[in-house]
Image (cartoon, rainbow, N blue to C red):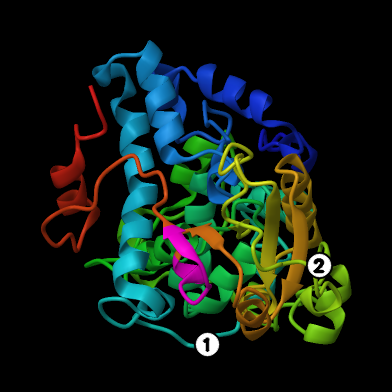
Amino acid sequence: MNDPVAPLAEHFHVDLAAVLDRVRAIDPRAYARGRDALDGAATWLSPFITHGIISTRDVGEIVRESHDAQASEKLLNELGWREFFHRTWQLEGERIFGDLKHPQDNVRSEVTPSAVLDGDTGVDGIDVPIRHVIAEGTMHNHARLWTAAVTTRFGRTWWLEPARWLHFHLLDGDLASNHLSWQWVAGTSRAKPYVMNQANVNRFAGTDQHGTWLDVAYEALDTLALPKDRAARRAVDYAGFDARDTMMPQLPGRHLADEPDALVAGTPVALRSIWNLDPRWREDLDRQIVFIDVDHALDWPMSAKRWALVEHWADQCGATVLHGSLDELRAAAADTDVVRREYPACDGWPGTVEERPWLYPMPGMPFPSFTKFWKQVKGTQGP
């Protein structure tokens, strides 16, 4: 297998004009034809969307300016998946971090197989993307599905800790999209799990590998398991980002406690999270702060590459980066006019809350599946 076409981490250290140029360059027909292949027409916009640099609405509206609804349908559908996951998070809250509808079956451990952590499953179309995401933070969505299936279905591992591990490495690690995708693969949010065999991997990874443990007919997948020589497990090493005393010095910015004048009474503040790094947001306010909730960062650690990306885009926003506890933020903002954007991980933050720019409205009826979500919102994103 050739090296993945997934971009390097440095390719996301650009400016907003470059990001918008990438959106305008999308060919939605090519995307619809080839998005499932690892060397296909993926947009690679997800890190920008995850961090709120651009929104699903931005992408949808820009694409629709140059392409009709039929040509754009598949891309708009995939943007719908992201909003479906986030609307589910809004409604379900912390429940998305446990089995959403029913328990995962055939679980033997909560500890991830070492073969997955090392990219050593023996299947090239999976191993090369795993090693790439560890090195660069990017991974094609199809490779994510394969990785999750190897870990959960064939590795008999409960999905939560491996989902946390992948979230750590991904530049676009998104708690809703990542964790609910793992649940989709593991079968805890729908009727059955996702499975694939070597032929499926070869088809979409561009490999021609045969004779692996995964090289079986689909009828044999129900009882297939990782071979014994690849079934050893170990705890994940988060490079010091899962302990407060080692994480704090690695975070961007300064401790809020060391900046007593960061939020001053009478000075309006645009309070940004790491998921709202759009340089266009509240440009009318001179005081721009990106706050990092240390306790949240401990719960969901992120790699040094990811924090470097956050720091880059905070600078693009002209924002000061501060980190601390939620109690410290509330105390500092007690007498300050603060405005922020809605985001489930920030529900306890102070300030006046603005709605995020959604491409689709919240459905009026329940949507326990994407099909029921899409049926209600399809065609509502504008003329």
The residue drawn where x is 37% and y is 72% is: 223
Q: CA distance from mark 1 to mark 2?
A: 32 Å
Tag shown at residue 63: none
Label 2 neighbourhood size at 10 Å, few (<14), some (14-19), many (20+)? many
Outermost residue toward the left in this view: 365
Name the one closer to the observer, 131 or 219.
131
Q: Quadrant of the C terminus?
A: top left
Disc 2 marks which residue?
A: 251
Tag shown at residue 109: 1
- When asked about the image quadrant of residue 336, the answer is bottom right
Q: Secondary structure at mark 2?
A: loop
Q: Is residue 367 left or right of residue 157?
A: left
The x and y percentages for residue 247 are: 81, 76
361 in relation to 239, above or below:
above
Q: Going from the N terminus, do you reach mark 1 or mark 2 first?
A: 1
The residue drawn where x is 32% and y is 43% is: 80
- Residue 298 located within the stretch drawn in magenta: no
Q: Quadrant of the N terminus?
A: top right
Label 1 neighbourhood size at 10 Å, few (<14), some (14-19), many (20+)? some
* Three-letter code for the amino acid on which mark 1 is drawn: Ser
The residue drawn where x is 71% and y is 67% is: 264
The answer to whether one can see residue 297 in this image is yes
The x and y percentages for residue 129 are: 66, 48
Magenta-colored span: 344-353
330 in relation to 356, above or below:
below
Total labels: the figure holds 2
* Three-letter code for the amino acid on which mark 2 is drawn: Leu
